[in-house]
Image (cartoon, rainbow, N blue to C red):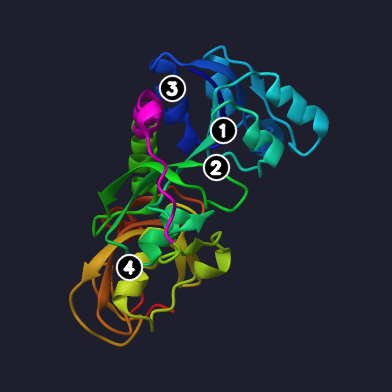
Amino acid sequence: MRLVFMGTPAFSVPVLDALVAAGHEIAAVYCQPPRPAGRGKKPRPSPVQARAEALGLMVRHPVSLKAAEAQAEFAALGAEIAVVVAYGLILPQAVLDAPEHGCWNIHASLLPRWRGAAPIHRAILAGDAETGVCIMQMEAGLDTGPVLLREAIPIGPEDTTGALHDRLSDLGARLIVEALAQRPDLVAETQPETGVTYAAKIDKSEARIDWTQPATDIDRQIRGLSPFPGAWCEIAGERVKLLASRLGSGTGAPGQVLEGFTVACGNGAVEITRAQRAGKKAAEAADVLRGLSLPEQLS
């Protein structure tokens, strides 16, 4: 099929690769404009732009699609479908209507649960047993369109957002290829009105650990915010990111270090398995503890 691809971050790259490998014609790739990055703050292309250029595809990165000229340029591509995955811009109705069969979105949740910006983070933070990918026919509402294809995967007890991100990206790549192949036979499933939740963007204020909270909540906080923005606590006046964990054993006052890197919580305990000191690379807990003496109590 003749497609337009719209995506920006690393999550979207396997999808672009899968569409090319499946033999689809990519009329153009849309992504966010390059952003200043690094010490020199030089504009750096997004992962999708870098990959698309390596594949020899035409890339467009408008700041907005609201202008009539930008919408006309999009319509002139003559796409049968636009495949959208973590693009980052709102698509006006004129853009949604331009492809022959509309715009299909790859969304990393089991809709209608976790509509919105941070579905992977929120699924772990909430303690969901499973998540998945939905291929959705886009409409003007926020992730409200009918679902064309879906597949669920379990969330493991030690899964981080980073690990789940990679699995869901690969799943989305496979599922969109299947959906396009089945297009004439797909039946759009209207999302139910019950069970709707919204995955609000993660705020850095959510990252500081409060050891008086239950161990289950803190474990989810650590895993759900890993690798970004990274849950953290202060150890001897130093901010340390806690990037992986599991439920531990033992009891004590909230914040009390029990054994190794196991810390008592308001209820139960959490064992930290991976962490990152300020200015250093992330490392396994045993390696971090070689250069860091834990006090008896964490704040």
Q: Nearer the viewer, mark 4 or mark 1?
A: 1
Task: Tell me where the magenta segment starts and ends, as one range.
Answer: 175-192
Tell me the amino acid under the disc marked 4: Asp
Residue sitting at x 37%, y 34%: 186
Q: How many marks?
A: 4
Task: Find residue 219 and name its label.
Answer: 4
Q: Position of residue 265 (x, y in %)?
A: 32, 80
Labelled disc at residue 14: none
What is the C-alpha distance between the residues marked 3 and 1? Answer: 17 Å
Residue of label 3: 19
Q: Residues within 10 Å of mark 1 (few under 14, many from 20)?
A: some
Q: CA distance from mark 3 to mark 2?
A: 19 Å
Task: For label 2, count other residues whose C-alpha is less than 10 Å away and answer few (under 14), some (14-19) or many (20+).
Answer: many
| Discs 3/2, front | 2
Residue 111 in the image: above or below residue 102: below
Picture quarter containing residue 200? bottom right
Specify few, some or many for label 3: CA neighbours under 10 Å numbering under 14, 14-19, or 20 or more.
Answer: many
Q: Secondary structure at mark 1?
A: loop
x and y, in percent, of residue 136 in the image = 46, 42
Is residue 244 visible from the viewing direction of this image?
A: yes
* Residue designated by label 1: 102
Sequence order check: which comes first, mark 4 or mark 1? 1
